[in-house]
Amino acid sequence: MTDLCTCAKCGRITDIDKLDAKPSPTRLLRLVRLLRGQLFMLRYAADRGYDFDRLECRDCYGPGYVEF
Ligand SMILES: [Zn+2]
């Protein structure tokens, strides 16, 4: 039994195990990503307790994608 979910970026219906979560982009997180890169931004958001509630597929996710 697999759960299907929609990629928040491209809208493709994907097995939820193939999606990885990101924090919803705020202005601050966009700025951090722009200045320091996505990996830094993900760590920054995790350290500050942002909700990782945006699911993206491997193609959309970019650096830091983790498959469960
Ligand atoms: Zn996608």
Image (tube, rainbow, N blue to C red):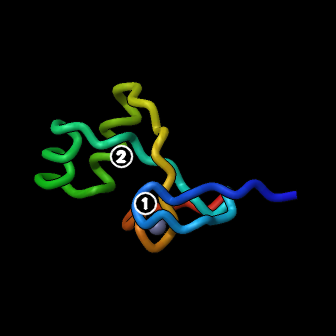
Q: Amino acid at mark 2?
A: Leu
Q: Amino acid at mark 1?
A: Gly
Q: CA distance from mark 1 to mark 2?
A: 8 Å
Residue positioned 88% across, 57% down in the render: 1
- Residue 39 is situated, as x and y percent measured from the top left of the image, at 33, 55
Asked if the residue at label 2 sits under 8 Å from ligand 1, the reply is no
The residue furthest right is: 1
What is the crowding at mark 1: few (fewer than 14 residues within 10 Å), some, or many (at least 20)? Answer: some
Drawn side of residue 19 relative to residue 60, left or right: right
Quadrant assignment for the C terminus:
bottom right
**Hey, which quadrant is residue 2 in on the image?**
bottom right
Give the numbered dot on residue 15.
Answer: none
- Residue 31 is situated, as x and y percent measured from the top left of the image, at 13, 45
What is the crowding at mark 2: few (fewer than 14 residues within 10 Å), some, or many (at least 20)? Answer: many
- Residue 19 is situated, as x and y percent measured from the top left of the image, at 58, 59
Reply above or below: 60 against 22: below
**Hey, which quadrant is residue 46 in on the image?**
top left
The residue furthest top is: 49
CB-based contact (under 8 Å), mark 1 and mark 2: yes
Residue pointed to by mark 2 = 42
Residue pointed to by mark 1 = 64
